[in-house]
Amino acid sequence: MINQWLTVTCPLDLHLKLLNLSVPINGLRYSITNCKLRVSPIFILSALATFLYSLLKANGEKTVCGRFNVIDSPEIQWLCETLGINLTARHTSRDIAPGAKIAFVHEVGGERVVSDAIWWLLLDHQTLKPNYKYASFNSRSDKLNSKHGIAYIPYRQSRCIIPASAFVEGLGDKKTYHMIELEGSAIAFGGLYKQHLNRETGEIVFSASIITLPPLTPQWNEIHSKSMPLMLDFEDTALIAQWLDPGNDDVDAFEHLLEPRVCKPMLVTRIDKPGKWNPIADSFMIMK
C-alpha cells in the first residue's frame, strides 16, 4: 500500500497547505496536475498530521489574545482622535480571529496611516497567506532580541499599534474564557508588521502580530497563566511617537514596556466561548 500512488482531488489552497507542511521523507514525491494531487498514502498521513499539529499548536494553551474586536464606540473614537487617525466601518468587527484581516496604525513619511493586515506575521512566500507551520499572530517579548527570530527586524523597523475594544483570553482548559476591556478606554496593542509584495499583481500585502508579555501575576493566574498582550498608553504622546517612528531603532527605550503591568483598570468578564462573547458571570476589576 505504501508504494502505491493515489490521486486526490481537493481545493488548491489545501494542496498548498499540504505541500508547505509536508515532512521530507526519502522516496516521497508529489505532483499537481489539473488541481489533482498525486501522492503516496504515507505522504497524506504525514502532511495531515503535521497540519493538524500546527493548528493545535496555534490554538493551544500557550497562545494569548486569540481573539479581539473593534466596535464603533466613544472609546474607539477617542483613540482615533488622540492618535490622529480615522477608522471606518470596514475596520470594525465584533469578532476577529487569527489569520483574519485587521486594521493597524503605522507611520509612513511622517504621517500616521491606517492599513489592512493579515493577523499572522509569517506568510507563505508563494501564496501570501498565513504560514500555518508557525503560530505567529503573537510575538513573544522574550524573542524580540533573538537575531534569528522573525520579530527581530520588525521590532526595530516596523512597530505598529493595533486598535481594539476588547479581547479574549483562554485559561487553556478549553472551558474557561474571559473578555478583557479597559475601563473607559479603547485598547492600543503594541504590534509588529511586515510588508510583502504580491509578484503577480504588484500589490503590497501587510502582515502583523501582537507582542505578548509574561503573565501578570497573581491577577492573571485564572485568566491566562502563560502571558498577556502588550497594551500601550496611547495618551502618552511621546511614547507613541517613539514607538511608531520607523527610524527609531533604539529598542532599549522600550524595555520598561515589556514588563507586565496594569496601565489602566481592566474589566474582566467570564464568557461562554471564543467567538460568541456571551457573558456567563459577573464582571470584576483588575486595578492598577
Image (spheres, rainbow, N blue to C red):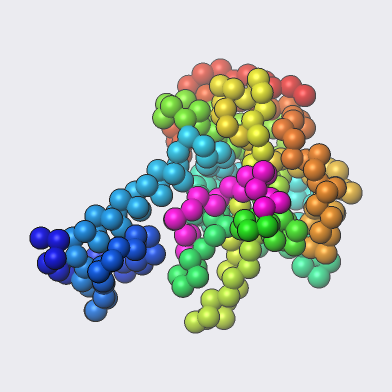
- In the image, residue 235 above or below residue 11: above
Q: Residue at x 57, y 81 (%)?
A: 202
Decide if residue 56 is on the left or right side of residue 281.
Answer: left
Quarter holding the C terminus is: top right
Residue 61, percent across and down? 48, 34
Quick one: which residue is furthest to the front in this view?
26
Residue 203, percent across and down? 57, 76
**Magenta stretch: includes residue 280:** no
**Magenta stretch: includes residue 144:** yes
Image: magenta residue range: 129-146
Decide if residue 257 is on the left or right side of residue 94.
Answer: right
- In the image, residue 287 above or below residue 88: above
Q: Is residue 21 visible?
A: yes
Q: Residue at x 41, y 30 (%)?
A: 174
Q: Quadrant of residue 160?
A: bottom right
Decide if residue 32 is on the left or right side of residue 174.
Answer: left
Residue 187, percent across and down? 69, 41
Q: Residue at x 60, y 65 (%)?
A: 206
User: Mainly helix, strand or loop, the magenta region?
Assistant: loop
Residue 49, percent across and down? 30, 50
Q: Is residue 116 visible?
A: no
Q: Nearer the viewer, residue 232 or 145?
A: 145
Q: Quadrant of residue 241?
A: bottom right
Quarter holding the N terminus is: bottom left
